[in-house]
Amino acid sequence: MRKQWFQSLLMRRAVIILILLVEISSFIFLIVAGTTISEIASIVFRVISVIVALYVISKNDKGGYRLIWVFLILMFPVFGGVLYVFINSQMLSNRYAKNLSEVIENTKDQFVVNPQIKEELAEKYPSYVRSVEYLEKMENFPVYKNTNTQYLSPGEAFWPVFLEKLKTAEKYIFLEYFTIGEGKFWDSVLEILKEKAANGVLVRIMYDDMGCFLSLPSEYPEYLKSLGIECKVFNPFRPFFTTIQNNRDHRKITSIDGKIAFCGGLNLSDEYVNEKERFGYWKDSAVMVEGEAAWSLTCFFLQIWQINQVTSEDFSNFNPWLETPCPIKNDGFVQPYNDIPIDRERVGESVYMHMISAAEKYLYISTPYLILDEDMISALSLAAKSGVDVRIVTPSIYDKWMIHQATRCYYRDLVNAGVRIYEYTPGFMHSKTVVIDDKAAIVGSVNWDYRSLYLHFESAVWMCNTPTVVDVKNDFLKSFEQSDEVLKEELNYKRGWSLFRLILRLIAPIF
């Protein structure tokens, strides 16, 4: 069976790559031909490029993204504007955005905001009210109490806990992941899912087609359905250049009966639990949410699942706390949140900016990619200059050479401002975590780069006054010990290398 899947996988990928190569060749031909087309046609295309450049400048996109497109249009004035229009065709995205907006609007009543909890938070931790209020006001994401959290890092610590909790499912299991890959980890998960589905538990799986481009064949949904498991592929990849291909489902969410949920950076593939070595030791993290806050993560899954459904589901049928009060009682605050690229609200960036401004003593950040705009560079630099101990951990062993070099483009400005940069020497730092002042932390799927902050579907969990916060901090302290700090004298590059990194920094927003 696996041999057939591999052949199917290889055939589909080969066809897609061939079509993409034809398109790339066509673009190159058009650019070269631009010097030989008639004068009238050249003038027409140049006028189109000017109009498109003005349109790009007027858009509410980030400055770096607009800059690179204006630069490309000016570099190729004949076909630059046409290229932008072709690549940024959003007909499919507009239809999807409309459907998703309707689902979100129709399910707002599933997120019940309790003003008393926010008032209690304001009394105990006034520095964090702005972030909580922003998420409640703009996106209707409640902050909860009555929720336990457990920080799980690295992947080897996550694996047994994840399997144990899957076995407790009585009504449903929902899984939404960017990447699923066959191997020991996924096989152990699938065995439980098959057994649960056979016993009447509703099992649903949703994965991103781009994320599974090289790991699952196109027939895999049919295979899962033969096991009694419902499956959807998010945004099927098509071999045509359009920015809809950038809007990937990068979230990692599991919901078990709406009572327990997982969120973080871990996908369901062997490298994430170090059963397979790809880029040295893989350092990752997730958080288990048990109690009332698990309901928000459940709704996040159901909203995307609902898109293009013939009939609408009543989400309340999945809510475990409607008739039976949650038995968990504690003093911590937990706020899961979601970021979608089609509503123009930059949730992930805004929450990170709130964390930067709220930090008084220290701010620790881990991310595999560090590609920032000027606002975030200024905020991090200002925090460091104001006496906050700002530290960022990135990988030493990279998965993508070009993006890693782009990440290093930002080191000099940050280090000169007093930010301490560490590169995790054992391998690949894939964890996306933030912690400040022993009081608040974030664990989620949001990288500190343009794709995560502005293009992808993402999710994360903000926590305050929970034991998890200290666990995240202690994990950072271990990572610092295993990392090399980047020193100022290491950032004095040769002229040729400096020029190369300046160019990388210019084009980084479209990586």
Image (tube, helix red, strand yellow):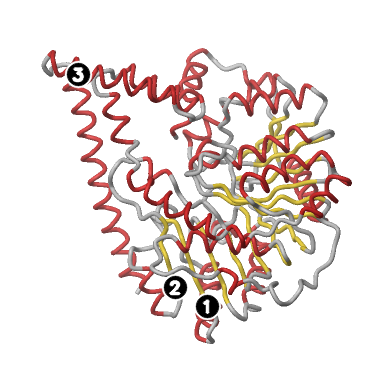
For the residues bearing labels 1 and 2, Cβ distance under 8 angstroms = yes
Q: Distance from label 3 to label 1 (Cα)?
A: 57 Å
Residue 463 drawn at (x, y percent): 75, 51
Question: What residue occupies the far right of the structure in this picture?
Answer: 124
Q: Is residue 282 visible?
A: no
296 vs 291, left or right, is left
Foreground residue, 351 or 343? 343
Of the two numbered discs 3 and 1 on the same chain, state the one appearing first in sequence: 3
Say which amino acid is labelled 1: Leu
Inspect the image, locate mark 2, and give the three-letter code of the amino acid beneath it.
Glu
Q: Nearer the viewer, mark 2 or mark 3?
A: 3
- Residue at mark 1: 202
Measured in 3D between alpha carbons, the distance from the residue under mark 1 to the one under mark 2, in whole angstroms, is 8 Å
Which quadrant: the C terminus? Answer: top left
Which residue is disc 3 drawn over?
44
The picture places residue 290, in percent across and down from the top left corner, at 72, 66
How many circles with numbers are drawn on the protein? 3
**Residue 258 position in % (x across, y down):** 64, 70
Q: Earlier in the sequence, mark 1 or mark 2?
A: 1
